[in-house]
Image (spheres, coloured by chain):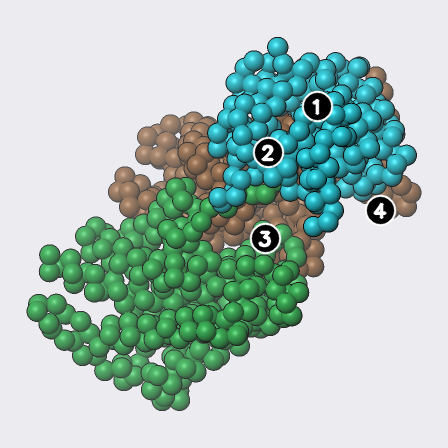
């Protein structure tokens, strides 16, 4: 009973926090304190959080290095734009189709490639990501290399906020369940997991499909904020961008991914005029993090109130519920 | 009907025979030992039974049903669980989570229930939590359930691996050198424990062990493997006095 | 038919370039199991060094190539020491991510200092002649590229098969621990491998400069990836495999752009890669080895 009360208490606190955050930002937008520039970066931040958290499901929790996340984002972007701009359906249909299309692509790509291990998988996913882009560049219906422009701006703050919250809640809930433990067991020791009854291929594909679906969501949000989508936007450098966030935050830490996504977005905003410097910093982040802290800033730990207690309370707080 | 029956099983790696025409049978609730010098192919036999390797030829029957070539997770679901010679725990996870993963084959709620946090999720998690604790209690690990698996001392890691295997609710338990690296006292305790869980869970147990005296003491029947082939089979008394077995072991010590 | 043979000839020089780059990938992979993502960018640096030694120092193409090879050999050794050596004992994923970081680093440091501007390889370095034989056109550039690539491959084969260093390299790639016990310094061998691989990439860089006439800081990415595909195609870790794979990729690419669309030539490379990985991940000449449990 004690446990149940605590769970509810935590839940209510979280809801209050989210409502407050939403209302605050909405207020700042309405009164004009958050001007267009801030709003653009806020949107990018939300999209990056979705991308980082979803890639982290694949790279961090499942331990399968995927370098093709931008490809799924591209599929989501184009699928949603086809629905809304070319076929005049409402945005929500565009979003749903984007996620389904990306999930389907994730399934089609995941089933054969996830048999590959480690660096081979990384290269194969990189290859698929690039193939998606090149194919999109050659489809006349979606405008070829020029892409589609004149997309209505539908990614508003409420839409963005709901999308980010849904992404995090779905992935966190999934990870903190028996299914999540099965996914993590794949990362820990594939052979042992199989012998313990875990169909590792199934869980790898599951993680890949769910990750792809949310990358598709990010693509849809992106396309409906910036008026135009071009296949070139989703090249493998975009995949590396997302990888930087996941690596920096810690492979296997959702809070780490969120923090890193926010940090990288802010960094990008400051370095907008200096694209080369930005990329040099990214490169150094990858190299230095891998050499000195290969588990990333948070490793596979989550940042929670408990960890704050641990840091500032000075005394050891055991992680038991009792 | 025998619990597990193996006919004419062979496996070679790059032209080198690891297991050759292996025949084997074990009855319900029997405790059988598989011994042999280093490199005799014992672990390969285990890997073939549990589906980690695919055999080149031969058949494996579990309770009369052909399980040859099935993937490991299917074989596990059909009731075979194992441990590893070189301990393969989920190192970064807690002791409790290691066992919970083994319980996943019977997960009592759906994926959507966990995403939506439906009541069935909370009930199911509570049930899994209690079940996992029970398995840990058997091995005296419940007091350290929140420790990270890799931080445990060697003996506890071995016991956790057995607890985890047991949590998949097998009918046949395969132990690969469960007492390796343990002192005589620990080994004795472990063997008592193995006997106890066999009776408690009605298990059939097959184990590989290096320590001859130990195998002789606990196993009802013994198979001896050398260069991938069975060279002797029988009760401990017979094995002790078998000339070929002595040769195989002496040969190893000299070489 | 004549057109087909012409395409083959065109593909041959491109293939020689890919083969040179693929050799570096495959040698490094053979020794430390790392996909050196930055390898294509070392080639790019080689192309720039060649460019500047021609345009600023007025050296001829041979001198430029040697200069580029020496510079990049040093660069390769430094990169390995600074970025890869500390990760020798960590996971392969960590090493791969570092290599991606190193690749971005080389690209954008070059971009920062030399800008994204295309630079045209000085025509004076290599006056173009075209020869027509039985209806087929071949240029002195193509001949130069193919001949010098083949010479380098022969030298490489000699080093690996006949010299003590080559023997040590093969020993390290077979069994690192045993090699150490035999008194071989693994660090030294890894350094030499990086030096040789990077030098070959630099030569390829100068050749790409000649082949496409233009160079830019991001030019290493695509040929690098294609050469990697070539290495995988031939069986990664196998030196003859990289050579054959390189030529095959070059020919395939010219055929695809000749008969289909040059838009697809990059996608085809990845398609080939995925097909091999799915059908025979060990490549054309590789042997299968399962994971030991």
Task: Indicate the position of residue A63 as horizontal and vertical percent values.
Answer: 60, 42
Residue mark closest to the camera, 1 vs 3: 1
Residue carrying label 4: A311
Residue carrying label 3: C92
Would you identify the image quadrant in which residue A26 lies?
top right
Residue mark closest to the camera, 4 vs 2: 2
Tell me the shade of chain B: cyan
Disc 3 crowd rating (10 Å Cα; few below 14, some 14-19, many 20+) is some
Evaluate whether residue A11 shows in this view. Answer: no
B147 or C168, which is in the foreground?
C168
Would you identify the image quadrant in which residue C117 lies?
bottom left
Chain letter of the residue beneath label 2 in the structure image: B
Residue positioned 70% across, 23% down in the render? B234
The quadrant of the image that shows the N terminus of chain A is: top right
On whether disc 4 and disc 3 are found on a single subunit, the reply is no
Residue carrying label 2: B229
Disc 1 crowd rating (10 Å Cα; few below 14, some 14-19, many 20+) is some
On whether disc 1 and disc 2 are found on a single subunit, the reply is yes
Chain letter of the residue beneath label 3 in the structure image: C
Residue carrying label 1: B234
The CA span between labels 4 and 1 is 61 Å
Residue mark closest to the camera, 4 vs 3: 3
Q: Answer yes or no: do the residues labelled 4 and 3 have beta carbons within 8 Å?
A: no
Task: Indicate the position of residue C178 as horizontal and vertical percent values.
Answer: 63, 61
Residue mark closest to the camera, 4 vs 1: 1
């Amino acid at each position: 009973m004690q446990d149940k009360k605590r769970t509810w208490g935590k839940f209510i606190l979280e809801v209050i926090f989210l409502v407050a955050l939403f209302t605050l930002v909405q207020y700042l937008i309405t009164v004009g304190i958050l001007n267009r520039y801030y709003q653009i970066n806020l949107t990018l931040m939300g999209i990056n959080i979705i991308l980082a958290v979803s890639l982290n499901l694949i790279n961090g929790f499942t331990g399968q290095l995927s370098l093709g996340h931008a490809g799924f984002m591209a599929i989501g972007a184009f699928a949603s734009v086809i629905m809304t701009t070319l076929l005049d359906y409402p945005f929500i249909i565009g979003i749903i189709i984007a996620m389904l299309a990306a999930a389907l692509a994730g399934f089609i790509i995941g089933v054969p490639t996830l048999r590959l291990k480690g660096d081979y998988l990384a290269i194969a996913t990189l290859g698929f990501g690039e193939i998606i882009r090149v194919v999109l560049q050659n489809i006349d219906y979606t405008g070829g290399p020029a892409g589609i422009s004149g997309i209505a701006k539908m990614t508003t703050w409420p839409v963005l906020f709901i999308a980010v919250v849904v992404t995090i809640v779905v992935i966190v809930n999934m990870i903190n369940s028996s299914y999540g433990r099965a996914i993590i067991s794949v990362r820990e020791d594939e052979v042992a997991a199989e012998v313990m009854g875990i169909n590792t291929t199934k869980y790898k594909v599951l993680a890949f499909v769910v990750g792809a679906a949310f990358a598709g969501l990010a693509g849809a949000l992106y396309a409906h904020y910036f008026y135009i989508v071009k296949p070139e936007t989703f090249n493998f450098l975009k995949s590396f961008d997302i990888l930087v966030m996941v690596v920096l935050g810690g492979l296997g830490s959702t809070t780490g991914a969120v923090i890193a996504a926010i940090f990288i977005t802010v960094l990008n905003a400051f370095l907008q005029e200096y694209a080369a410097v930005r990329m040099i910093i990214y490169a150094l982040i990858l190299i230095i993090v891998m050499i000195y802290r290969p588990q990333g800033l948070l490793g596979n730990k989550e940042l929670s109130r408990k960890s704050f207690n641990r840091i500032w309370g000075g005394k050891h707080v055991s992680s038991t519920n009792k | 009907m025998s619990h597990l029956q193996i006919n004419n099983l062979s496996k070679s790696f790059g032209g080198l025979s690891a297991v050759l025409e292996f025949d084997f049978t074990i009855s319900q609730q029997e405790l059988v030992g598989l011994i042999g010098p280093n490199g005799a192919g014992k672990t390969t036999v285990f890997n073939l039974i549990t589906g980690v390797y695919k055999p080149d030829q031969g058949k494996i029957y579990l309770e009369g049903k052909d399980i040859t070539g099935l993937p490991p997770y299917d074989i596990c679901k059909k009731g075979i669980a194992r441990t590893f010679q070189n301990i393969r725990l989920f190192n970064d996870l807690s002791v409790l989570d290691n066992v919970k993963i083994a319980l996943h084959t019977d997960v009592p709620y759906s994926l959507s229930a966990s995403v939506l946090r439906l009541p069935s999720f909370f009930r199911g998690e509570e049930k899994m939590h209690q079940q996992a604790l029970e398995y840990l209690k058997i091995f005296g690990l419940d007091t350290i359930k929140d420790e990270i698996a890799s931080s445990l001392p060697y003996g506890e890691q071995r016991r956790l691996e057995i607890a985890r295997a047991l949590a998949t609710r097998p009918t046949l338990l395969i132990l690969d050198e469960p007492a390796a690296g343990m002192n005589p006292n620990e080994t004795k305790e472990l063997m008592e424990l193995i006997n106890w869980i066999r009776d408690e869970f009605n298990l059939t147990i097959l184990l590989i062990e290096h320590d001859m005296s130990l195998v002789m003491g606990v196993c009802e029947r013994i198979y001896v493997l050398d260069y991938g082939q069975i060279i002797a089979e029988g009760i401990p008394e017979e094995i002790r006095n078998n000339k070929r077995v002595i040769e195989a072991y002496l040969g190893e010590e000299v070489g | 038919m004549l057109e087909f043979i012409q395409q083959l000839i065109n593909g041959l020089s491109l293939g020689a370039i890919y083969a040179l780059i693929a050799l570096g990938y495959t040698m490094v992979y053979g020794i430390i199991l790392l996909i050196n993502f930055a390898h294509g960018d070392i080639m790019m640096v080689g192309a720039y060094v060649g460019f500047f030694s021609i345009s600023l120092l007025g050296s001829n193409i041979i001198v430029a190539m040697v200069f580029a090879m020496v510079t990049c050999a040093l660069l390769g050794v430094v990169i390995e020491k600074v970025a890869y050596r500390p990760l020798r004992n960590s996971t392969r994923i960590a090493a791969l991510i570092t290599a991606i970081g190193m690749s971005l680093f080389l690209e954008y440091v070059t971009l920062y200092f030399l800008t994204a501007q295309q630079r045209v390889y000085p025509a004076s370095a290599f006056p173009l002649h075209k020869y027509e034989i039985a209806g087929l056109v071949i240029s002195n550039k193509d001949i130069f590229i193919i001949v010098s690539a083949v010479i380098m491959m022969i030298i490489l084969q000699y080093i690996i098969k006949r010299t003590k260093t080559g023997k040590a390299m093969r020993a390290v790639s077979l069994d690192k621990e045993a090699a150490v016990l035999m008194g071989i310094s693994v660090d030294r061998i890894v350094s030499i491998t990086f030096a040789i691989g990077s030098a070959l990439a630099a030569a390829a860089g100068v050749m790409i400069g000649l082949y496409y006439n233009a160079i830019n800081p991001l030019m290493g990415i695509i040929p690098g990836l294609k050469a990697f595909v070539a290495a995988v195609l031939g069986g990664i870790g196998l030196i003859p495999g990289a050579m054959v794979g390189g030529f095959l990729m070059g020919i395939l690419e010219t055929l695809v752009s000749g008969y289909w669309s040059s838009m697809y030539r990059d996608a085809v490379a990845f398609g080939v890669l995925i097909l091999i990985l799915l059908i025979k991940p060990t490549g054309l000449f590789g042997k299968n080895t399962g994971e030991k449990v």
